[in-house]
Amino acid sequence: MKIEIQGLNQIYPNGNHALKDINLEFGTGMFGLLGPNGAGKSSLMRILVTLMKPTSGVVLVEGQDIQKHRKELRSILGYLPQDFRFFTALKTWEFLDYSGSLAGLKNKRERIAEVDRLLDQVGLLEVRDRQANRLSGGMKRRLGIAQALIGNPRIIVVDEPTTGLDPDERIRFRNILSQLSQHDVTIILSTHIVGDISSTCQGMALLNKGELVFSGSPENLVKNAEGHVFKLTLSPYDYERVKEHYNIISTIPVESGWEVQIVSDTAPDFESISLIPNIEHAYVYFMEHKLHTELGE
Ligand SMILES: Nc1ncnc2c1ncn2[C@@H]1O[C@H](COP(=O)(O)OP(=O)(O)OP(=O)(O)O)[C@@H](O)[C@H]1O
Ligand SMILES: [Mg+2]
């Protein structure tokens, strides 16, 4: 599904300008929304799922303004809020069964089959009869993921879905999403963890303090950081000087002092080797670069 975000601003009643003139466009497949705490990811997602009306701007889904077609949108939507919680005495399977009926699965037998299929997919089949609010934190998160997936939504919005998941579960979850993204589903995933943005994301956006600082493919993000990442071996004295002027992203002790990696617009005034950037380097480069451009440096 084609999603167009045009001139979006969100200003909260207390004056917080959480989204500043955001323009974005993406289609079927996985779209990653990356940014540090307070960047505006959840605000953008709440607007996308029509839980919040933006101060200005529009979101179009297949050319239709979502504010004017809330009901239709909600019927094809799966959403996992960042603070997903439930205060019920329902068993795990019952909770998901209830979510399924809300999502429009009318046939009871089919619904229960779907519940068990999803519980299996997120690794909760063994605890299907346990009371949902007695699950562990990570298990609750997985149940949250399952309730976002039930009812075959065409658009899936998941806000920090991997919070609290162990590494195995993160991988499992990533695989579920990348399989889904091949079935004509649009997935929007937010995260502050660079590693969650994998090559399975066709598109991504980088938000910082309400501003869009990058949008494009993850490969493109990395490409933009080429020639801006350097490795230096420094004496303890030089280390202090480098620390003052450059953005150090890693430090390893070596015999002669420190081996450090820095992100910089231009080659440093110290002997250095240019490194092939990875996505983490690129993230730091973009965040810093944008900051310096803003300050007019
Ligand atoms: N209800 C609200 N009222 C006022 N300000 C808010 C409200 N919700 C969020 N904000 C502010 O808007 C900004 C963006 O918040 P948002 O929750 O969208 O960021 P985020 O990128 O999801 O952050 P995190 O990674 O911590 O979840 C922050 O400065 C936040 O304090
Ligand atoms: Mg958030």
Image: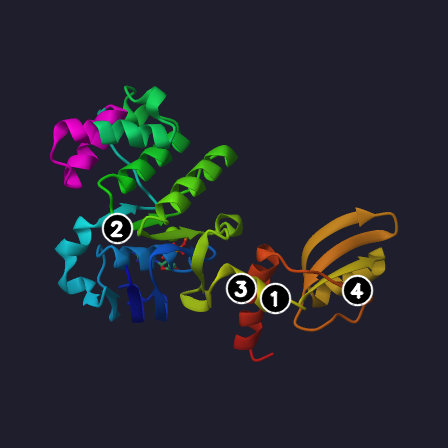
Question: Which percent across, then down, holds residue 66?
Answer: 19, 62
Which residue is located at x 45 percent, y 36 percent? 172
* Mark 3 vs 1: CB contact within 8 A: yes
Residue position for label 3? 221
Crowding at label 3, few (<14), some or many (≥20) Cα neighbours within 10 Å? many
Give the mark nearer the N terminus: 2 vs 4: 2
Q: Which residue is more in the foreground, 54 or 154? A: 154
Which residue is located at x 43 percent, y 68 percent? 212
Q: In what element is the residue under mark 3?
A: helix
From the viewer's perspective, tell me whether residue 272 is left or right of residue 122.
right
Which is in the foreground here, disc 2 or disc 4?
A: 2
80 relative to 88, above or below: below
Type of amino acid at the residue the image marks with label 1: Ala
Residue position for label 4? 272
Residue position for label 2? 154
Q: Is residue 92 visible?
A: yes
Type of amino acid at the residue the image marks with label 4: Ser
Which residue is located at x 78 percent, y 53 percent? 259
129 relative to 62, above or below: above
Crowding at label 2, few (<14), some or many (≥20) Cα neighbours within 10 Å? many
Q: Quadrant of the C terminus?
A: bottom right
Measure the C-alpha gap from mark 1 to mark 4: 16 Å
Give the mark nearer the N terminus: 3 vs 4: 3
Q: Which residues are magenta?
A: 91-112
Which is in the foreground here, disc 3 or disc 4?
A: 3
Residue position for label 1? 225
Which residue is located at x 22 percent, y 68 percent? 63
225 part of magenta stretch: no
Type of amino acid at the residue the image marks with label 3: Leu
From the viewer's perspective, tell me whether residue 68 is left or right of residue 22.
left
